[in-house]
Image (cartoon, coloured by chain):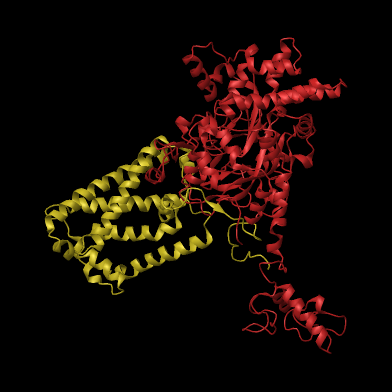
Chain colours: A red, B yellow
Amino acid sequence: MARNSAAPGRRVKAQIAMVMNLDKCIGCHTCSVTCKQTWTNRAGVEYVWFNNVETRPGQGYPRRWEDQRKLRGGWELNKRGRLKLTSGGRFKKLATIFANPVMPGIKDYYEPWTYDYRNLTNAPLGDDTPVARPRSLISGKPMKIEWSANWDDDLGGAPQYGECDPVVEKLHAQEARASVEEKIRFSFEQSFMFYLPRICEHCLNPSCVASCPSGAMYKRSEDGIVLVDQDRCRGWRMCVTGCPYKKVYFNHTTGKAEKCTMCYPRIEVGLPTVCSETCVGRLRYLGVVLYDQDRVLEAATTPDEQDLYEAQLGVLLDPEDPEVRRDAELAGIPYDWIEAARNSPVHALISRYRVALPLHPEYRTLPMVWYVPPLSPVVEALSETGHDGEDAGNLFGAIDSLRIPLDYLAELFTAGDTGPVRTALERLAAMRSHMRRINLGEESGAEDEDAARRVGMRPQEIEALYRLLAIAKYEERYVIPTAALGDADRLEESALPGGCSLDVEGGPGMGGSGPFGEESGPVAPASVENFHALRDRQTTDAPAGRHTAHRVNLLNWDGNGRPEGLFPKRKRASRDSEGERR
Amino acid sequence: MSTVWTVLPYLAALALVGGTVWRWRYDKFGWTTRSSELYESRLLRLASPVFHYGILFVFVGHIVGLFVPDSWTSALGIGEHPYHLLSLYGGTAAGALTVLGIAVLLYRRRTNGPVFRATTANDKVMYLVLTAAIVLGMWAKLAHSSGNGYNYRLTIAPWLRSLFTFQPDTALMAGVPVLYQVHVVVGLVLLALVPYTRLIHIFSAPIHYLFRPYIVYRSRDVGRPGTRDDRRGWERVP
């Protein structure tokens, strides 16, 4: 097919992406638990959480995963401004293959354990109540539990551990340089927190894939899901280092890498991932985005870290653009996927309303799980000071003056640029006050329009955003096209252009049996069989079925006579029919 | 005795080639280094590269020593004595690295609880044979190092090459010192063990990493849920 007027060098690809609305996350860990029950409740991955929920500020899981100076994940620009793996290029990878120099150890995640439950029932009679002592699943020995995936949940231990958060560390260093008074504190009254659920980012430019020496990791071309081929993985562990989000794990029993699969068996049949399906807060959104594969590298090479957010937005394509839709069709993306991209809540939150932001774009992997930043810490801080926390005017002022969340969020989502975070938060604030006015029946008018315009939106858009974020209907949160529909034309041997159904070995003139007698050779497609059956019915006098050389096809049978093989032979041993069954 | 030098090498070759094909077909999932770096990394990061680089040099030394005939190096003007010195010092340096590496690795494997717990019986046999092969090789080399040393290039090397032409010349092995003979036998056993142990990972040296594009795209397999071929006896009904 010719691509006459397609934009030069545009290769449209589809990607299943996720957005999480942090404002609604209550930190219940249901997503983590259901994910674990589904995927990692096995030996070797006891310490692995494909989905985990971190309290921020906090160290996260594994501990201090954001400290790339030490853990060396992701990409960086070399002196000539070209993209290179932070952990070293191809030659360095091969030279250090005998022991990965910067792989996190089990203690950086946590040492998994179980309890000596048997002791509770088997302990001999004594003065003391028997207890179930913790026992390490790694060494098998009794252990002292000192850390786990969620040790600092809800800021637990924050006065002691809070400073270990790499983002806090960075902000404090900046403040020290600018000799500003310390902004982030962990004393009870001055602290703030929010939850950050994390899964694999299924990046457009995945550094784990680039790090794999065996070529076992790949990005699926149909839906962009990043997977590990378990048969090709040789356990070099370079992906664990390569992923800046530390979302590729090493199964210490099988010796292979494992990671979040975006629940691809569910996605393929149109179901949301387990973490999304079970999310109590209904804060996850799944949908298709279209992107231009040819601009991925260019975007990832953007010189200024703070421009990476905009650069990634530039890689994503607008499915409402007919040119994009045509290019997508030419690239072989099925029609229902393109339609799903138009209805995609993810596309809406990322590109249309621009309230979702990528996690740590400065890692240059172009992550595809985006976050709506939380407004709640601001609202709460405002309400505590006796102000109306939902008034647009108050909120707009507070977003700026409460620099703590804003700077912190900017370090997470925009490499430190507070602009896009402020825009997103202001849009959320405008949405709150706009909807409150509607709910309270206050007259809307110029003031209403004005508040909307201040954040660059129309009232209708604000209401649509409200519907998506607050009402959050199941069908609107998860717009997932199935893989099967996309494959339909390949699965059915139909008369669709691109392949004649009768164009198979044997063809329409087929008939008779294979070279080695009955049932030898490949199985004839049903359409070919039907073709012959129909022709036979029209041209022969004998009861149908007599002449067909192959198995009896009930469609061939016109009800006359008793074709050979329709019923099992009466006095034959059952062993024969067993052989025929195949 | 002479049958040892005909039957054993071919059995070992059969076990090596046949075993590797079998493993490739039936156990791609088990084909891995089974790294224990997650449990312990301090000693591993030192000892593992030392051992692996050492044994790679040892391997190259064996290839040169066994497959480059005496006459070729003589034609290049390298006399018997300089060759012996090169072989002795180069080989001993590489061997020392290997022995040091495997000593630390064995110490780590035995003393570190989680690492020892993850060691299977298969691993133990493999370590035994591997260590024996290395130690015997070093021992044989150093025990016969006086003067020009033992010239295996006139006996063991031509015998090995004669195996490849399927005309094994066992007479060549008759006068070889016992230490060398034992080293050869243990070495053959080690080769035979490769496909059935974690040593299989030596066949997955990822050289193609240097030449492939960084990001790998792959299509979803159509009509087949897994990426693996069906196991024999478990094929899907068409």
- Residue A52 is drawn in which quadrant? top right
Identified at 68% across, 29% down, the residue is: A22
Q: Along the line of sight, which residue is nearer the eye, A206 or A146?
A: A206
Q: Is residue A186 left or right of residue B204?
A: right
Q: Residue furthest bottom?
A: A541
Front-lying residue, B105 or A558:
A558
Residues A343 and A538: in front is A343
Q: Is residue A57 among what the camera can see? A: no
| Position of B238 relative to A324 (above/below) | below
As drawn, A240 above or below A323: above
Q: In the drawing, does residue B159 fall left or right of residue A549?
A: left
Front-most of residues A450 and A255: A450
Of the 4 image quadrants, the one containing the C terminus of chain A is bottom right
Residue A465 placement (x, y as % from top left): 75, 32
Question: How far across and how far down the image is residue A272, in percent?
Answer: 72, 44
Residue B8 drawn at (x, y percent): 34, 67
Residue A555's place in the image compared with B198, above or below, is below
Q: Percent from the top left, x then y, of residue B201? A: 43, 53
- Viewer can see residue B179: yes
Q: Is residue B56 left or right of residue A268?
A: left
Exactly how many numbered labels are in the figure? 0
- Of the 4 image quadrants, the one containing the N terminus of chain A is bottom right
| Residue at (59, 19) in percent of width and height | A157
